């Protein structure tokens, strides 16, 4: 596309990095679901399969309310 390699195209995207806030808990939980699912598939005795997109929302609600915790969000085309 436009004569750029896929690597150059990836690096040309505009990214906005910002501190997460309480309204990001649902999105963070959805992102975490995919990783949690992989862990549960490979180690079912240690990890449980997420039951919904919101499975980690209580965790992120708690973390985002803690002033000593910082979570960053990277938004493409921000």
Image (cartoon, rainbow, N blue to C red):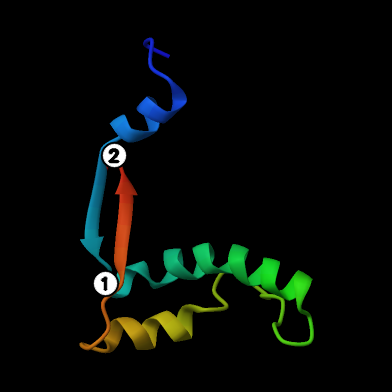
Residue 64: x and y in percent read: 31, 81
Instruction: Give the distance between the C-alpha atoms of the residues marked 2 and 1, in whole angstroms.
Output: 19 Å
Residue that numbered label 1 is attached to: 21
Residue 5's place in the image compared with 47, above or below, is above
Give the secondary structure at mark 1: loop
Task: Look at 29% across and 39% down and name the residue there.
Answer: 77
Is residue 27 or residue 15 the one in the foreground? Answer: 15
Residue 35: x and y in percent read: 60, 66
- The reply to whether callout 2 and callout 1 are in contact (CB within 8 Å) is no
| Image quadrant in which you'd find residue 37 | bottom right
Give the secondary structure at mark 2: loop
**Residue density around tag 1, few if under 14, some if 14–19, many if 20 or more, within 10 Å:** some
| Image quadrant in which you'd find residue 76 | top left
Residue 52's place in the image compared with 68, above or below, is above
Task: Look at 44% across and 67% down and name the residue there.
Answer: 28
Residue 2: x and y in percent read: 37, 11
Is residue 4 left or right of 53 when viewed as pictured?
Answer: left
Task: Look at 57% across and 78% down and name the residue there.
Answer: 55
Residue 77's place in the image compared with 42, above or below, is above
Residue that numbered label 2 is attached to: 77
């Amino acid at each position: 596309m436009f004569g750029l390699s896929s690597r150059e195209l990836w690096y040309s995207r505009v990214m906005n990095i910002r501190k997460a806030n309480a309204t990001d808990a649902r999105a963070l939980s959805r992102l975490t679901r995919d990783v949690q699912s992989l862990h549960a598939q490979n180690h079912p005795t240690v990890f449980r399969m997420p039951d919904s997109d919101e499975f980690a929302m209580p965790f992120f609600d708690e973390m985002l309310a803690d002033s000593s915790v910082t979570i960053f969000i990277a938004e493409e085309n921000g």
